[in-house]
Amino acid sequence: MGCCASTPSNASPYPQQANSSSRAITSSQPQSQAALPRPSTNASNHSHRPHPQRARDLTSHPSQPLKLHTWTSKNKTWTPQDLDRERTEFFDTRVTGRAEIWQALKATLEVLWNGGDPGDNDGGLATAQMILDAAGITIPSGDLAGGVYDAFGNHYSLPEHIVANPANLTVAPPADDDDDKTGDEGSEIADEETIIRRREEKGKGVLNEADLVEIRAKLSDRESQPLRIIISKQDSVRLVMQKLFDASDLQSPRYIKIAYMGKILKEGQTLQAQGWKEGHVVNALVFGGT
């Protein structure tokens, strides 16, 4: 019919912009992908990894001035002999840490055990601090029983009975109780006194001046100059202890132990047999009541 208009076969009832829109989507896809934020590799890894922590400098530890450790034993009764044995065993069995640090710690404690050198009025704290500083040892708490560190950050633990005597240290029997002593110790003392008395009675106790020697003993209970007494080179430490006790005006139940070079000397041997050199000062450690 003449009124009907022909329509092209490829004509679309929709506007042409649909095709152009399709092309726009295709052509703009890379741009759209670029606009979207990509997951960050670092962020992904960061979410699965712990936050990095700042490494701690193990070689740097704050140090406080050295102070004396005080404590009271609650579970054990300690005697001077027990402490001496335990301390010797402790330092002989150290297998961890640096040997030179253990040696410095032992030297430090020997000063403190003996109450310092003659003339010290601080219990040996200043001398002990010098040893620690020279060895590069730091004490975070100022108390050796709290542990120490060397220059490499290694930690060293020290039990308190190694560091100091307990306040309730058990004392030895008073000197007046000698008559009640039994066993080898009492017999040994009696034998020595008998020998001396017999030597004097027979005239054989007159000693040559070459056998006499002066010793100086620093008493731990006072700040005075070392006490001077004359003894025989053959005198046992026990006899020297008694002479020092008499010369120092001490009263029972107080008693004396002699220490030299950080060790309490054996009572049955002479000073020289245990390494004492003439002219050296010994430490007279006073125990017992005040």
Image (cartoon, grey):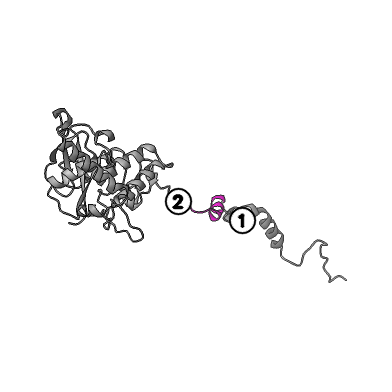
For image coordinates 51% across by 54% down, the residue present is 50
For disc 2, the neighbor class at 10 Å (few under 14, some 14 to 19, many from 20) is few
Residue 113 is situated, as x and y percent measured from the top left of the image, at 26, 46
Above-or-below relation of 181 to 89: below
Q: Label 1: state its secondary structure.
A: helix
The residues colored magenta run: 41-52
In the rendered image, residue 159, in percent from the top left (x then y), is placed at: 36, 51
How many marks on residues? Answer: 2
Quadrant occupied by the C terminus: bottom left
Q: Nearer the viewer, residue 42 or 14?
A: 42
* Image location of residue 254, percent across then percent down: 19, 53
Question: Which secondary structure lies at badge 2?
Answer: loop
The residue drawn where x is 70% and y is 62% is 18
Residue identified by numbered label 1: 32
Residue 48 located within the stretch drawn in magenta: yes
Q: Is residue 63 visible?
A: no
Q: Residue at x 12, y 49 (%)?
A: 249
Q: Residue 72 or 286: which is nearer the viewer?
A: 286
Res. 273 mark? none
Dominant SS of magenta comes to helix
- Nearer to us in this view, 33 or 290: 290
Q: Amino acid at mark 1?
A: Ser
According to the image, label 2 marks what residue?
Answer: 53
Residue 50 falls left or right of residue 170:
right
Residue 195 at x, y percent in the picture:
22, 39
**Residue 208 appears left or right of 135:** left
Say which quarter of the image contains residue 130. Answer: top left
Q: Is residue 93 left or right of residue 274?
A: right
Quadrant position of the N terminus in the picture: bottom right
Is residue 104 in view from this perspective?
yes
